[in-house]
Image (spheres, grey):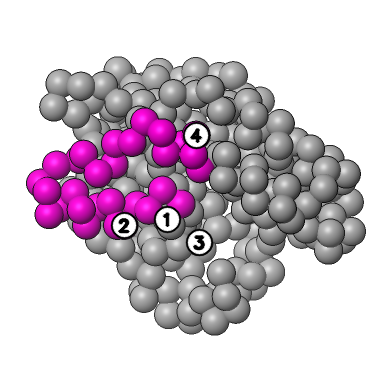
């Protein structure tokens, strides 16, 4: 993301609006042009994964309303990781809904011990502070919300407490497994970042995390950031076809992971 994008996100976040849309089954995209946010309408209430930037709260709340849902009915709010662009509206959503909030345990430790690592100096909001999660995730958990089973797999690297999520949706009588890789960015793996924050373990953890997920079967890849998984392009294709088919690609998740791995080794060595 360029500095001018970062500025735009703070100064005129409405330019990042994406009209919300259904991906497949009971799964909806409610993110913005930069960052993903996913709403699952379960028999036991709404489940949200990631809450976008603090400056994009109005977009997220409006997106949920545009779909005919209310932010007040969110029961569970999961986070891929503890950077401000993924939990920026969590305070609002918790206040409006009383939802349970979930975060990787190691990112909850980071909130307390290394708050500069949530990267919120880019938020443009004075005194922006992290939330206190209700449930700490270690990976390996399976949560059941009605007929939706949400599997959590620990994928540290981009952050220590980064979590990836897997669950099924049903569309036109078929089941599809959705996969959301919790954090792919290299910005926390650079020499400069590691020198500043001392996270010398992150590169090897990143590669181990990718290897851990390579055999996961995923039919629908969800982008942690919107461009990953080409969420908007697929939506445009889905609209023109009148079907969810453009979102379904059984090889994409693995392709994405392998591409990240290849790029990683082009840019870094494991310390
Ligand atoms: Zn991040």
- Residue 76 image position (x, y, % from top left): 43, 34
Instruction: Please tell me which of labels 2 and 1 falls first in the chain.
Output: 1
In the image, is residue 135 above or below residue 259? Answer: above
Q: Is residue 41 left or right of residue 222?
A: left
Distance from the alpha carbon under mark 2 to that under mark 4: 20 Å
Distance from the alpha carbon under mark 2 to that under mark 3: 18 Å
Q: Which residue is mark 1?
A: 226
Distance from the alpha carbon under mark 4 to that under mark 1: 17 Å
- Along the line of sight, the residue nearer the viewer: 21 or 123: 21
What residue is at 55 percent from the left and 19 percent from the top? 141
In the image, which residues are magenta? 228-256
Describe the element under mark 2 as helix, strand or loop.
helix
In the image, is residue 262 above or below residue 57? Answer: above
**Ligand 1 has an atom within 8 Å of the beta carbon of the residue at disc 1:** no
Q: Which residue is mark 2?
A: 232
Distance from the alpha carbon under mark 2 to that under mark 1: 7 Å
Tell me the quadrant of the picture where the C terminus can be found: top right
- Residue 108 image position (x, y, % from top left): 70, 40
- Along the line of sight, the residue nearer the viewer: 46 or 35: 35
Based on the displayed image, in which of its 4 quarters is residue 204 positioned?
A: top right
């Amino acid at each position: 993301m360029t500095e001018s994008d970062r500025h735009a996100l703070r100064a005129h976040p409405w330019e990042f609006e994406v009209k919300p849309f259904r991906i497949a089954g009971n799964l909806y995209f409610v993110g913005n042009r930069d960052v993903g946010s996913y709403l699952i309408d379960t028999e036991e209430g709404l489940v949200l994964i990631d809450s976008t930037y603090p400056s994009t709260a109005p977009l997220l709340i409006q997106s949920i309303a545009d779909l005919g849902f209310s932010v007040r009915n969110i029961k569970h709010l999961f986070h891929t990781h503890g950077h401000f662009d993924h939990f920026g509206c969590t305070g609002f959503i918790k206040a409006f809904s009383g939802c349970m909030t979930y975060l990787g345990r190691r990112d909850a430790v980071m909130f307390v011990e290394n708050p500069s690592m949530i990267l919120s100096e880019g938020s443009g909001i004075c005194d922006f502070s992290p939330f206190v999660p209700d449930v700490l995730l270690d990976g390996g958990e399976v949560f059941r919300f009605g007929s939706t089973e949400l599997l959590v797999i620990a994928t540290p690297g981009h952050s220590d407490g980064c979590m990836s999520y897997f669950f099924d949706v049903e569309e036109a009588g078929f089941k599809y497994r959705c996969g959301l890789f919790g954090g792919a960015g290299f910005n926390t793996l650079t020499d400069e970042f590691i020198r500043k924050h001392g996270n010398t373990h992150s590169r090897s953890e990143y590669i181990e995390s990718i290897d851990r997920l390579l055999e996961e079967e995923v039919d629908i890849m969800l982008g942690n950031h919107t461009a990953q998984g080409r969420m908007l392009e697929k939506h445009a294709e889905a609209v023109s076809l009148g079907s969810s088919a453009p979102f379904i690609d059984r090889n994409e998740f693995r392709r994405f992971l392998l591409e990240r791995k290849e790029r990683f080794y082009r840019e870094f060595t494991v310390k």
